[in-house]
Image (cartoon, rainbow, N blue to C red):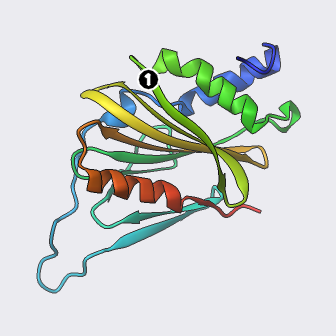
Amino acid sequence: MTRFAPSLPLLALALLALPILPSAHAQTAPATTTAPATAPTGERIINAITVTSTQGYKITVPGGWTPLKNAPNVDVAFVGALRPTVTVTVSDTPPELKVTLADMRDLYASQMPKDVPKLKMLGEKIIKVSGQNAVLWSYTGDGDGGKVRWTQVFTLKNNRLYTVNFVAPVNTPQNLLDSGRAILDSFALTAK
């Protein structure tokens, strides 16, 4: 049930938020590059990368995940073997709207059935990210290459909305699912 009545300012907010909603097609595009399984003699193997963004967050990605350059509508994106992806999106909300996490949750929930074909919500939980309340969702739906599962975390701090998506085909091996969840769990806010 929506917690706010539609109004012109909230409609504007909805339009601002639309690019950060999960797209069934954009999130499941195949990787164009893959990380080497072993490094040639004399080269180092990268075990993990920590991205510290000027947008006010950091996230750690284990070895075997490849950064995607020029991914649309996201701050950073990584792809693992067999196409699971992790993306981080940051969006500022107008301070005069006094948007709450509950408002964003309701906006996302109302938009998801339009954006995710055959949406099936698996769970919702309130968690903490760097002391801030955050919403954790798990859901499935149809993607570009078949059925996929999303695990999504979003939080709001100082009128800035942070959304982290982990998307994987439903037949993804458990070790890759665990790796993707570890990336989500590493997400932390650095903005004051």
Q: Can you say which quadrant of the picture contains the C terminus?
A: bottom right
The quadrant holding residue 12 is top right
Q: Position of residue 118 (x, y in %)?
A: 39, 17
Residue occupying image coordinates x 66% and y 31%: 105
Residue 17 is left or right of residue 94, and the answer is: left
Q: Is residue 67 visible?
A: no
State the residue position of label 1: 120
Q: Nearer the viewer, residue 172 or 58?
A: 172
Which residue is drawn at the image coordinates 66% and 46% (left, top)? 134
x then y, percent, for residue 144: 29, 26
Tell me residue 164's x, y (percent).
52, 46
Judge whether residue 95 can be spotted in this image.
yes
**For the point 88% across and 34% down, which residue is it?**
96
Q: Left or right? Give the position of 49 relative to 37.
A: right
Point 47% across, 68% down: residue: 50
Farthest residue in the bottom direction? 42
Question: Does 1 appear above or below 32?
Answer: above
> Is the N terminus in the top left, top right, bottom left or bottom right quadrant?
top right
| SS label for mark 1 | strand
Question: Farthest residue in the left direction?
Answer: 41
| Local crowd size for mark 1, using a 10 Å CA cut-off: few (<14), some (14–19), many (≥20) | some
Q: Quadrant of residue 91?
A: top right
In the foreground, 21 or 76:
21
Quadrant of residue 100 within the rendered picture: top right
Q: Where does the image place residue 24, in percent across and percent down from the top left?
A: 39, 27
Q: Is residue 37 above or below residue 111?
A: below
Give the left or right position of residue 44, taking residue 115 as reference: left
Q: Which residue type does callout 1 highlight?
A: Lys
Which residue is nearer to you in this view: 100 or 38? Answer: 100
